[in-house]
Amino acid sequence: MSKNNLEEKIIQSLALKSNIKQLVFDNNEVVFSLMKKTLTEITDDYNKQLTNLKERVRLEFTDHGEFIAKLRVAGDMLVFSMHSNIFEFDREHKVWETDYVKTDPLNSYCGIINIYNFLDDSFRYNRMDDLGYLIGRIFVNKNNHFFVEGKRQMGFHFKNFGKRLLDKSAMRSILAKAMAYALEFDLLVPPYDAVKIASVGQMTEKMHISQIQTGKRLGFQFNSDDVMEDEENS
């Protein structure tokens, strides 16, 4: 291949991929905005039904700007994080087996919104060593088609990628499942050997803020194949 042909190929590739990635990013931004609006509505809707309960049992939504939002659900904190970059799946991912991606490989370029589950107290008391867990991640492409990869209660399998737009109804379903999963995902007592030794410094600091590492699960691992079928197929 001549130098001119190679340069032309590079320019075409850059132009095509840059255009696709910008379109995906724009879609992801719109989806994240929809997510925050839906979280606000869910907070209002649920709190109207929780008027007789203590304040900390009620929902609290916080918008932290372009890439982060938080929802307090009783003792849990769900953190929604939109990644600023666009990704393609590795060649081992099963999304490549779908006709949707086989027909147009550019459909595989996706933005990602991660959903993490923390303890509310971890933020309340600035326990920087506490752990949060990825319970789901939403993939959105150039056509605003999506699927959700996550733990058992999360829904929409990759086999249905390309069959549904990420509209308000789908968003509300995803958020409800994330909330339900967080509430069912109980805090476990840490293994004795993990906390049997403490330094004077740790205890001194603990008098101010808790320093013993806390998380809802120890040894938790997110498995990308730990998913459910779409609601239509469940």
Image (cartoon, rainbow, N blue to C red):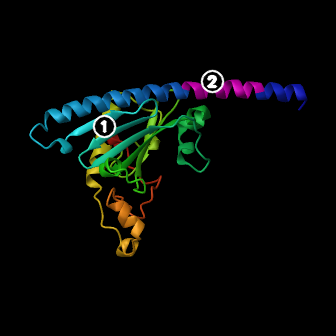
104 and 19: which is toward the camera: 19
Q: Is residue 161 magenta?
A: no
Quote the CA–CA distance across marks 1 and 2.
Answer: 31 Å
User: Dot 1, crowdedness within 10 Å: few (<14), some or many (≥20)?
Assistant: some
Q: Which residues are magenta?
A: 11-23
Q: Which residue is tagged 2?
A: 19
Judged by its main secondary structure, the magenta piece is helix
Looking at the image, which residue is at 24% across and 34% down?
43
In-front residue for pair 16/40: 40
Residue 70: % across, % down? 35, 39
| Crowding at mark 2 (Cα within 10 Å: few <14, some 14-19, many 20+) | few
Under mark 2, the amino acid is Asn
Q: Say the numbered circle drawn on residue 121.
A: none
Q: Is residue 154 left or right of residue 42?
A: right
Q: Which residue is mark 1?
A: 173
Q: Is residue 194 visible?
A: yes
Measuring 72% from the left and 28% from the top, which residue is drawn there? 13
Quadrant in the picture for the N terminus: top right
Sequence order check: which comes first, mark 1 or mark 2? Answer: 2
Q: Secondary structure at mark 1?
A: helix
Tell whether 191 sits left or right of 147.
Answer: left
Going 18% across and 35% down the picture, which residue do you hit?
47
Residue 148: percent from left, percent from top: 42, 42
Q: Position of residue 48 (x, y in %)?
A: 14, 32
Rendered image quadrant of residue 73? top left
